Image (cartoon, helix red, strand yellow):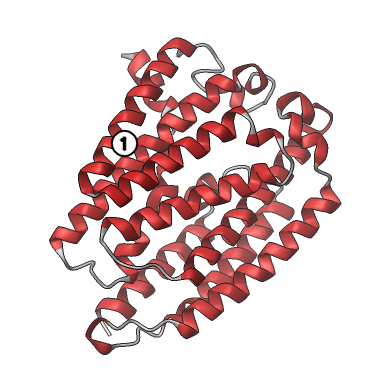
Amino acid sequence: MQLIIDVIRSFRPTQWIKNGIVLAGLIFSAKFTDPAMDLKAFAAFVGFCLLSSAVYLFNDVQDVEFDRIHPKKAKRPIASGKVSTQLALTLSVFLSIAGVIISFGINSKLGTVATGYLILNIFYSKILKRIVIIDVMTIAIGFVFRAAAGAYAVDVSISAWLLICTILLALFLGFTKRRYEVVLLDENATQHRLILDQYSLPFMDQMISVVTASTLVIYTIYTVTFKNYHNGTDPKLEYTIPFVIYGIFRYLYIVYHKAEGGSPTESILTDRPLMINTILWLLTVLILFYAV
């Protein structure tokens, strides 16, 4: 029984919230009230949850020795030895196959994106995470794959502005995570992740400033230029801008004042103001699309 619990923990189910972006295509296309589209979007979400867990397992096996140095990651099932690397790799293959099959079962475009997402993350685990800046950009591109997958799942086009905003927000989270690791691990940073030797606090602070401003500008442009041609209505998404501004500023507060930010998912789930803000943003989007 304990092994099953440890295996499930190694899947990192709390990180599945990141795959919520797969549902963006459904929500922003005003098809949320269509049961058939809901089913396809949910299936795509499940497929990417399986794929992301497969990637986590594979990456944890690759980093097992480095994770044992990290004060928090050392407690993970694979790093602590509760789940063997052989079992983790076997499960990773199984989850990968299941995720790709589900994606192709919806349509070939989604299956192709899912396969690309998997290949990208394999290259990340083996090579790209060792290249400065490229490591964070690769993670950000993974979020773009998720957004594109959600659009393909419900057969709608996706705004270029939304894709740009997605990659910028992912870069913001990626650089704040790298900053957290450098601050937390201090002199042991490079022992845990070699690439951290290439990052300095002034450099990351500058990168965070750039992507913060860029994210806010692009999201603003996206919302004020967005036109929802479903029933010829305009949802007035610009009303969601204050939530995005507060959310980013609150996260910066968490990073700089509370010295946290190592896990965006954990921050959303544990920081009450940030969680409430996220829920209010989502509710506002749903109201603007479906109740106004």
The picture places residue 184, in percent across and down from the top left corner, at 74, 36
Considering only vertical position in the picture, is 110 above or below 63?
Answer: below
What is the residue that sits farthest to the left in this orientation? 35
46 left or right of 74 in image:
left
**At x 30% / y 14%, what residue is drawn?**
1
Considering only vertical position in the picture, is 247 above or below 259?
Answer: below
Which amino acid does the dot numbered 1 rest on?
Gly
The picture places residue 19, in percent across and down from the top left corner, at 40, 48
The picture places residue 115, in percent across and down from the top left corner, at 39, 39
- Badge 1 local density, few (<14 within 10 Å), some, or many (20+)? many
Q: Based on the displayed image, in which of its 4 quarters is residue 65 positioned?
A: top right
215 left or right of 236 in image:
right
Considering the numbered disc 1 on the image, is that residue within a helix, a strand or a loop?
Answer: helix
**At x 59% / y 45%, what residue is drawn?**
138
**At x 23% / y 69%, what residue is drawn?**
31
The picture places residue 282, in percent across and down from the top left corner, at 38, 67
**Callout count:** 1
Q: Based on the displayed image, in which of its 4 quarters is residue 231 positioned?
A: bottom left
**At x 52% / y 11%, what residue is drawn?**
81
103 left or right of 24 in image:
left
Q: Which residue carries the number 1 mark?
A: 99
Residue 68 visible in the shown view: yes
Q: Based on the displayed image, in which of its 4 quarters is residue 88 positioned?
A: top left
Considering only vertical position in the picture, is 238 above or below 66?
Answer: below
Tell me the quarter of the image containing the C terminus.
Answer: bottom left
Residue 15 visible in the shown view: no
Viewer-closest of 138 and 60: 138
